[in-house]
Image (spheres, helix red, strand yellow):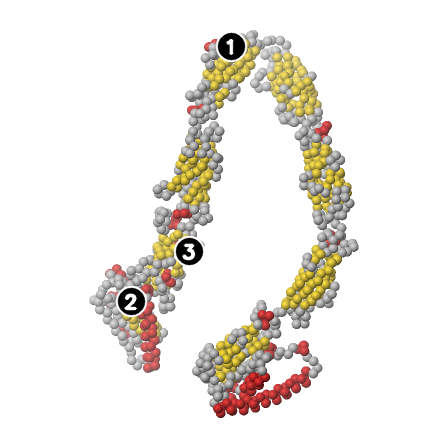
Amino acid sequence: MATVPQPQCFSALTCSTEIHSGVQFHCLCVRVCRVYVTAEWTNAGCDKQSEACSKAAGGVCCAECSDAEGALPQPELSAFRRSGCGFISECRWDGRCDKRLRRTENMVSDKRVHRLITRGEIQGLCVLLLYTSPLSCFSNFSPLIYKIKESSPKGTLIGAIGADLHLDFLVDPPLLFNLAQKKISAQYVELNNTTGELFTSAVQMDRESLCADRGEGQSCALALDVFILPQQYFQLVKVRILIEDVNDNRPRFPSEEIRLTVPENAPVNARFAVEQSAVDPDLGVNSVQTYWLVNDFGVFTLDVEENEGGELTPFLIVTESLDREQQAEYVTDIIAEDGGTPSLVGTATLRIVISDINDNCPKFAKAQVNVTVYGNATRGTQLARLHAYDPDQGANAQITYSYSERVTTETRSLFHLDAATGVIKLAGKMDANAAKLYKLTVLANGPACIPDVATVTIHVIKVVSGPPLLAPRYIAAEKDGVVSLKESEPAFTPVAFYTVKNADPRQKLECLLEGSGPFRLTPYERLKNEYLLETTEPLDYEMRQEYELAILCRHHHGVVLKTVVRVQVEDENDNAPVFKQSLLEIFVEENNAPNTFLAKLQATDADSGSRGEVAYLLGSDATPVFHLDRQVGVLTVTTSLDREEKETYRFMVRAVDRGSPRKESIATVVVIVQDRNDNSPRFINKDFTFFVPENFPGFGEIGVLSVTDADAGENGWVALSILNGSDIFVIDTGRGALRAKTSLDREQQGTYHLWIEAVDGGKPALSCITMVTVLLLDVNDNPPIVLFPQSNQSYMLVLPSTLPGTSITEVYAVDRDTGMNAVIAYSIIKRLGGEPGSFDIDPNTGNITLRKTLSDRGLYSLLVKVSDHGQPEPLHATVLVNLFVNETVSNESYIQSLLLRQATIEIEDGSALRESRQWIPDRQVFPCQPVLIGLSATCLGLFIMVVSLSVYVSCRKLRKHKKKRLGVEIPLKMNSDMQAVDRKLMEISNI
C-alpha cells in the first residue's frame, strides 16, 4: 500500500487554448502551492518575447507572469521552465503579475470566432483542473512507501506511482516517468515510463546483502527518485521500497567440525556451551530457532539458552556417567533449524572428546611368565618382555617397572630389568653344567596407584653333549607316528615341532622336508635347532586322503638325521550336493490326471559316508499340489491343473546332505501348463451400445467390441462376424472394430440392432453371441429458416405516436434439427436509417418492440440475425426488417425507392438464407409436381387479389376517421385463429 502525499494548494489562473496553423498554444499563469510557487509558460510555437508569441499566434492568447511575493527561493530558480513568453530573467520579483490578452480582429469569420471562444473556454477549464490537481503541488508530502519480499522474480509489480498519486493520464502531452539513474538502487527496479508502474528487474534484491548492517527491528529499504515530465507537469517523487525478509538462507556453523571437551568425571546434568553456534542472516522467525542432535548416544542432550541480545547458544548436557576408557570420543551431527516455512537447517559435525582423569592403575597383561634359557646363553640375551597396560592417557598412564624387595641383589645383578620398557636381559654369566630355577617378582608402578605384581620364572637348562638327535613334538593329533588333520584346517596349521639335540655347534646343520604335498619345514625363528612342520594351504579329502613326509637333517659331510611322518586327511562335510540341472522346465497339459509324473531330480555329493547321502525337499515357495519323493527325487502333481487359473508354476527344490553341519543346494523347477480348448470366447459386456453422429463417414470406426478367450494360442484366437445387417455394417474380425459401409442418416433410421458372433480357433471351435445397438445422434446440419418476414423488400407502417414498449412485429423462424441444434436466438446486427437504438428484439421470441419515442420520420431498416445453438459451430440466417415511420403511406413510390436503396445492403450468409427459403426436399419429387405447382400458383393469385381489395377498403375507412395506424404483424404460431390471419394478410396487401 503506497502512502500518497496530500499537498495544500491555493488557486490557479489560466488562459484559453487554441490551435492555429497546426500549432497548439497554452498560456498559463499558475499560483498554487504554499511553499514552491510555479510560474510556468508552455507555448510550442513561441521562442522569444510575448510580443513574438502574440504575433506568431495571431494574437490568440499570451501573457507574462512573475512570481508572487518573490517567495521562490534562489536555489529553486532552476525549476522554472519557459517557452514563448520570455526568458526567466524577464520575470519581475516585485509581487506584481502583469497579464495581457490580445486578439486579432477580422482574422476569421464570426462562425469560426464563435467556435474558437467556445473551445477555448472548455480547454481552459480542463487546464485549470489539471493544474489544481496534486500533480502541480510540490510541498508538504511524504515519500511513497511500497513493500516487496526479497528475491522476488523479475517482473513482480512493486507499485503504481501514477495510480497512487491519482494522476490524470489523459493530459496532453502525456506524462512521462523517469528514474534518477545515478542511484545504485535503480538497478533493482524497472519503471514503466508511461504508466509509472514499478517492477522488479533481473537483479534480485537480497536483503542480507543490501542491509548487512541492519539488525533485528531495523527496516531495510531502497530509496528512489522518480521525475514526472514533461516540464509543465514536473514533479520529483520520493519512493521508498521496504524489502521484507524471506527465509532464503539456511543456518550455517562457523566450521564444519566443532570440538567440545568434556571430562570423564563430569557429573550428570553438567552443562557445556557450544560456543560455535550457527549464524542465519535472516531475521525474526526466519533466523535460528532451535538446535538438536542427530544421535545423543543415550548420554547427552541439548538445551538452548537465549541471552539478553536475543542470541541462542546451544548447551550440551550430560545425562549419564562417562568413562573415557570405554569410549573416548563421541561423533554426531548438530542441527540448527530456523523457524521459516518451510524450515531450513544447517549441519555441522560435533566431536565430543572425553578428557582423561587418573581413575585406572597399571595391570600386567600376564601375571605369570615362564622363560627357558640354556646355561651357555651369552650376556645381553633378552629373556622376557613384560607388558603392563593403563587405560588412562598422558601422565596418568605412565608406567615404571621394578623388582620387588624380595628379589635378591645377586639375582638383580644376573638379570637386568629395564624400568621403562619392562625388558629382562641376561646381565651375567650362568653355569652351563647346572640346571637352575629363578623366580623374579616384578612390580608395575603408576602415579598414586598400588603396584601390580607379575612373576617371571626362568628355567636354566643344562647343556649336555652327545650324538645328534631329531626329537618330534606333535601338535596335531598323533597315533603310532600317524598324524591326523581335518580338511577344514586352514593354511599354515602347525603339525609338529622337531628339535635337533646334541648338535655340534662347530658344524652348521640344515634340516629340510622331503615329499609332495602342501607342507613346509621352517626354522623356528625364536630358538636355534628348532623346526616347525606346517601346512601351506588347506587340505582336500576329495583330492588326496594321505601324505608321507620325510624330515632330513644334514651338514657338509652328508645326512646325519632322518625321520618319517605320515599325515592322514580326515573328511568333513565341506561339499554341498550338486543338481545335474539347476533349472528344470517341465511341460504338462491342463486337465491332467491326479498324481501325474513330472520329472526325476538328480543331485550328487562328493563327500564320503553319510555326508554324501542326499535327500530331496520342496522349497517353501512350492504350492501344495506338487509332491517330491524325499529319497529318489520323483516329482509328481497331485491334482488336475487349469492353465486359465495359472499357467506357470515356479518353485525351488532343495538337495540336503546328512553331514554336520548340513549343506544343501537349490534348483529351480518351472512347470508350464499347456493349453486345451476348454473355454469359449466371452465379450467384455453382455451387450454393446454405440452413439454415432449422423453423417458419420463411411467405414469410419463406430466402436470396438472387446472379446476375450481364456485359452492360449490357436485356442484363444477369436474371429468376429455379423449375423444380421451385414449389407450396412462390417466388422474387423481381428480387432473387433465395427464400421458402416456408407454414411448414416438419422432422419432415415435412428437405431440399428446387430447380432455379433465370436468363434475361437480351437478344435472343436467354441463361440458366443452378443447384441450391438447403434444409436445415431443429431448434428447441426440445418440452418434456421425464416418464415416471416418473407422478403427483404417488405415493410410495415409504424405511427410516430406509438408508445415505447409497444410490440411492432415479430421475426419467426424454425430449425429442422433437434435439441440445442434447434434452439433459436434473435439479434439485431445492423441498423440503417432513423435514430439508432429505437427498436429492440427479444432474443428468445423474435418479438420487435419500440424502445423509445420516435422523433424522426422515415425508413428504419433492421438486419436481424437468426442463429441456432448448435455445436461445434452454430448456423444462422439473416433477414431485413423494414419499418416506415409516418402517419400514413402517402407516397408509395418514395417508399419503394427507399427499399431499393436499402437493397444494396450486403446480407451476410445470403446464400444460406436463400437456401433456407427453399424448404421443399428434393427427394420428395413425384410425377404430378408441375400440375400441383400450377394449381397452387393460381389459387395464391386469386387469394392475394381478394385480400388486396379488402385491405384497400379498410385503409380508406381508417384514413377517413383518422384512426390509429396499423402495425404490420404476421402471427407466427400455428394455433392462431383464422380471423387474425385474414386481418394481417389484408394489412400486408394494403402496404
Residue 139: x, y in percent?
29, 61
Label 3 sits on residue:
201
Can you tell which mark lies on residue 40? 2
Q: Secondary structure at mark 1?
A: loop
Type of amino acid at the residue the image marks with label 1 = Lys
- Evaluate if marks 3 and 2 touch, with contact meaning CB atoms under 8 Å apart: no
Q: Which mark is residue 429?
A: 1
Residue 592 percent location from the top left of the image: 77, 46
User: What is the x, y in percent for residue 106?
Assistant: 30, 81
Can you say whether 287 is above or below 557 in the image?
Answer: below
Marks 2 and 1, how far apart in space? 128 Å
169 shown above or below 854? above
Q: Going by the picture, which residue comes out furthest to the left?
A: 94
Residue type at mark 2? Answer: Glu
Circle 2/circle 1 CB separation < 8 Å: no
State which tag comes first along the sequence, 3 or 1: 3
- Give the answer, above or below, for where 902 lies relative to 340: below
Residue located farthest toward the right when viewing the structure as drawn: 764
Q: Quadrant of residue 606?
A: top right
